[in-house]
Image (cartoon, rainbow, N blue to C red):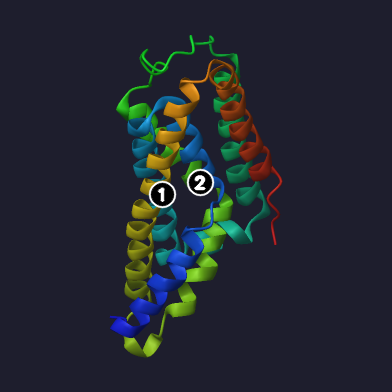
Amino acid sequence: MPELSTLALFAVAALALLIIPGPAVLYIVARSAHQGRRAGLLSVLGVQTGGLVHVLAATVGLSAIVLSSAVLFSALKYLGAAYLIYIGIRTLLARDEVADSSLPLPKVQSMSQLFWQGALINALNPKTAMFFLAFLPQFVHPERGPVALQTLTFGLLFICLAVCSDGLYALLGGSLGTRLRGNPLAARRQKYVTGGIYVALGMGTATAGHK
């Protein structure tokens, strides 16, 4: 097992990366601002479940196989991009809601839909696979025990920290959404901002390089 000092160093490095908003955070904030804190927090759990898939893949070496194959990498990349763009277009085409902070939030999908959308988006993101494959091994010391077990330990710690960090962003996004719904003009534009973020994230995923 890793030493406590190594775990502490890993936690500091992970938090330094997590506090910088990335594609996952933008997705969570957009979801939370548009559909409320509950939707944002469910999206956090989904996104980090998708991250867990990559942690397990990195642990058993599957990520290396995918990243070494241009065909598999491209398939994963375009599936993830298409799914994000699809969600964005659905948001843009959704019926406008009356802007009134006293009215209910826009219709929220079921808990399972919110969860699995977040999970699929992150699981189909090759950039996440590249991140874990590059980041986790830097803290692994073979002399401390099985490499796979150490990799899994660091990966699970990262996921736990990410749930806490992304959860805070979801709460902030929910507060932002509440304020926007009290502003008629901002509320009308909110779905276009949210949908635009989804589409932009999808296009960013589609242009991820394979190196």
Q: Along the horizontal axis of the image, is 82 left or right of 207?
A: left
Q: Residues within 10 Å of mark 2 (few under 14, many from 20)?
A: many
**Whole-percent x and y of residue 25?**
49, 46
Mark closer to the chain start, 2 or 1: 2
What kind of element bears circle 2? helix
- Image point 64% across, 29% down: which residue? 196
**Split into 4 quadrants, where in the image is the C terminus?**
bottom right
Along the line of sight, which residue is nearer the eye, 182 or 66? 182
State yes or no: discs 2 and 1 in contact (Cβ < 8 Å).
yes
**Split into 4 quadrants, where in the image is the N terminus?**
bottom left
**Whole-percent x and y of residue 61?**
46, 65
Residue 6: mark in rendering? none
**Whole-percent x and y of residue 112?**
32, 29
What kind of element bears circle 1? helix
What type is the residue that disc 2 sits on?
Answer: Ala
Q: Which residue is mark 2?
A: 24
Q: Which residue is mark 1?
A: 166
Q: Along the horizontal axis of the image, is 113 left or right of 71?
A: left
Q: Is residue 168 visible?
A: yes
Say if 139 sits above or below 165 in the image. below
Q: Along the horizontal axis of the image, is 201 left or right of 41?
A: right
Q: Splitting the image into 4 quarters, where does residue 130 fall?
A: bottom right
Q: Nearer the viewer, mark 2 or mark 1?
A: 1
Along the line of sight, which residue is nearer the eye, 178 or 112? 178
**Whole-percent x and y of residue 43?**
39, 38
Say if 171 sits above or below 161 in the image. above
What type is the residue that disc 1 sits on?
Answer: Asp
- Image point 35% across, 52% down: which residue? 163
- Disc 2 to disc 1, how far (Cα)? 8 Å
Q: Is residue 124 visible?
A: no
- Image point 54% across, 69% down: which residue? 134
Say if 44 sits above or below 8 in the image. above
